[in-house]
Amino acid sequence: MKLDELLSGMSPLLDPMRYVFVSVPRGEAMRSLEHALMLFHEHEGTTLVLADDATLDQRFVNEPKFARITLMVHSSLHAVGLTAAVSDALATSGIPANMAAANFHDHVFVPVERATDAMQALSALSRAAQGA
């Protein structure tokens, strides 16, 4: 799929849940796995993305909160340019973003307080691609 098709069809969807990024030792990650939206093993420890809900370990309640925006277009892991275009649109608006690719969709994590701004920027990007 071409970049303009991906952008015009991305239909960003804001998840009402809030998330935190935390780092734990590898063994501890396995105990927390059932509550993790995402995990990534790094040399220094395991990063978990956890929902900020009743399952959240009390050690993590003061971590910064992030909103997740799912790009609803079915993007391929081989697609070229989607992450760069989304990141650029958000950077132009001064919005920090953490991109995560899964098998069917790309997800963007932004600070909760910038979620509305991010949705506006991504919607504008999608509209611009529709007119291309």
Image (cartoon, rainbow, N blue to C red):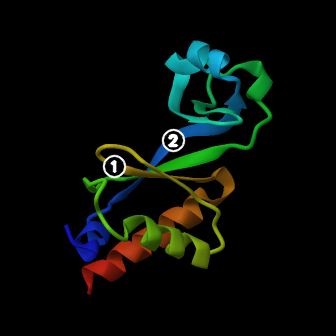
Question: In the image as oriented, which residue stretches furthest toward the left?
Answer: 1
Mark 2 element type: strand
**Residue 52: x %, y % from top left:** 63, 31
Amino acid at pointer 1: His
Of residues 123 and 132, the one nearer the viewer is 132
Which of the image's four quarters has the C terminus? Answer: bottom left
- Residue occupying the point 66% across, 36% down: 43
Q: Is residue 11 left or right of residue 20?
A: left
Q: Which residue is identified by label 1?
A: 105
Which of the image's four quarters has the N terminus? Answer: bottom left
Amino acid at pointer 2: Pro
Q: Is residue 18 left or right of residue 23?
A: left
Mark 1 element type: loop
Q: Is residue 102 left or right of residue 115?
A: left
Q: Which residue is identified by label 2?
A: 16
Question: In the image as oriented, which residue stretches furthest toward the front?
Answer: 43
Question: In the image as oriented, which residue stretches furthest toward the bottom?
Answer: 132
**Residue 98: x %, y % from top left:** 57, 54
**Residue 17: x %, y % from top left:** 54, 37
**Residue 42: x %, y % from top left:** 62, 37
Of residues 109 and 43, the one nearer the viewer is 43
Number of residues whose C-alpha sits closer than 10 Å to that of mark 1, classed few (under 14), some (14–19) or many (20 or more): some
Question: Is residue 16 positioned above or below 111 on the image?
Answer: above
Label 2, label 1: how far apart the Cα atoms are: 17 Å
